Image (tube, grey):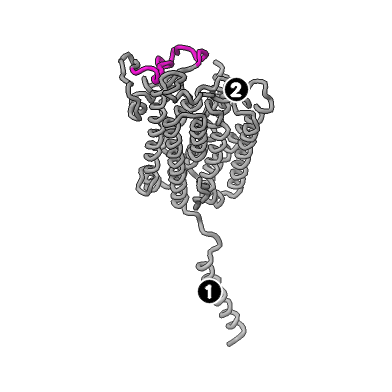
Amino acid sequence: MTIRQGRRLAAIAATAALTAAAFVLPAKADTDPKAVIATYADIALAKYEDSLATAKQLDEAVAALVAKPSAETLEAARAAWKASRIPYQQTEVYRFGNAIVDDWEGRVNAWPLDEGLIDYVDAGYGTESDENTLYTANVIANKEIEINGAKVDVSKITPQVLSETLQEAGDIEANVATGYHAIEFLLWGQDLNGTGPGAGNRPHTDFDTANCTGGNCDRRAEYLSAASKLLVSDLEEMVGNWAADGAARKALAEGDVNAGLSTILTGMGSLSYGELAGERMKLGLLLHDPEEEHDCFSDNTHISHLYDAIGIRNAYTGSYKRIDGSVVEGPSLSALVKEADPVVDSELLGKLDTTVAAMEAVAKRAEGGEAYDQQIGEGNAEGNAAVQAAIDGLIDQTRSIERAVASLKLDAIAFEGSDSLDAPDKVFQ
């Protein structure tokens, strides 16, 4: 064998070894978009299961309150309601892109509401509204009400009456009779403190038929029980939609892959921009109006906003920490964007963290004694600035979500907008 032949054989052997190594040890495995969508669906199921579990705990606490009204059982029901908000708010990122979720969401989290439809209200609330004939219908005090000129029997307050007769009665969105905020109103009552300290302060005797305050304690307890049970059944329905053969999961799994990725990004961008930054935060800040805060009866808004932001982030990172401490995770949208454009991925991850940190700062102020409605109050420069920083973070991350859409070469997405961001002058007209 000549030296040249030996070198040639060695070169062939080296090439073969490199080729074999290329098949055995790939430098980087591409992220499967279908796996990303599957992770998204798995996390949805986990979030709705956690929401259902905490709603059942709330229902048990409501049953205990109704059975034995006391300051202790009322406080326990309030604590259970607050706990139920943590997993539920993280599901809101599944709105907008998933029609099944968005069509259903109004049954469980619609706001704001004209609470005079449900129960007694303070004189400052007023007695009538040009936009809502049921503004002070007070179902708890009246066994018959009038809807669109027709008499309606509400002598029995059942889940069916709430969902089929009262929810959006007269086709008016402010007639919210079901879901978290109807329950919140019944547990706390109106917050009459404006931008001063304090939340709603309904007494436990409003549910005590033996020592009744507020009148109609039996019907108030009946309404609260019906609303609580309805929330459980509505969440059971959504858990089913994300189960293995559920309609929401199948719509994604069997649909176009790019459409599925767009669904994830639509929920992220629309919640970030129009819904959270705009309608839930900037509008209230512009008006300095406590009635524009999301959890306005309980002063729990700082928690709801924080977990909305966390929900947006975990939709991108493909990771969710359950209420039992376990983690559901898998191939993520972040990994997919990183392969397409690592700069965009790094930028978006950083901005999502920045927004969550700003929300945590708002929450820290609230937990320190300055509730969200005080933070948005007129003349509170530091509080206003804290809320504005969170709004700015949401707007900024939306721009990077748009860049993520472009990096994946998806069709441009029109995220939900808000006059409070896009045309603030209209807010004051």
- Most foreground residue, 143 or 317: 143
Residue 312 image offset from top left, x and y in percent: 53, 40
Which of marks 2 and 1 precedes in the sequence? 1
Residue 163 image offset from top left, x and y in percent: 36, 28
Which numbered circle lies on residue 49? none
Whether residue 114 is visible to the viewer of this picture, yes or no, is no
The CA distance from mark 1 to mark 2 is 68 Å
Whether residue 238 is visible to the viewer of this picture, yes or no, is yes
Q: Residue at x 53, y 49 (%)?
A: 325
Q: Mark 1, mark 2: which one is toward the viewer? A: 2
Secondary structure found at label 1:
helix
| Number of marks drawn | 2
Q: Amino acid at mark 2?
A: Leu
Q: Which residues are magenta?
A: 122-143
Which numbered circle lies on residue 16? 1
Is 271 drawn above or below residue 322 in the view shown?
above
Q: Amino acid at mark 1?
A: Ala
Q: Quadrant of the N terminus?
A: bottom right
Q: Residue furthest right?
A: 382
Q: Residue at x 44, y 33 (%)?
A: 62
Secondary structure found at label 2:
helix
Is 69 drawn above or below residue 425 in the view shown?
below
- Tell me if label 1 and label 2 are in contact, CB under 8 Å: no
- Most foreground residue, 93 or 167: 167
| Crowd tier of the residue under label 1, counting other residues whose Cα lies within 10 Å: few below 14, some 14–19, many 20 or above | few
- The residue indicated by pointer 2 is 286
Q: Residue at x 51, y 59 (%)?
A: 29
Residue 68 image offset from top left, x and y in percent: 44, 31
| 105 in the magenta segment | no
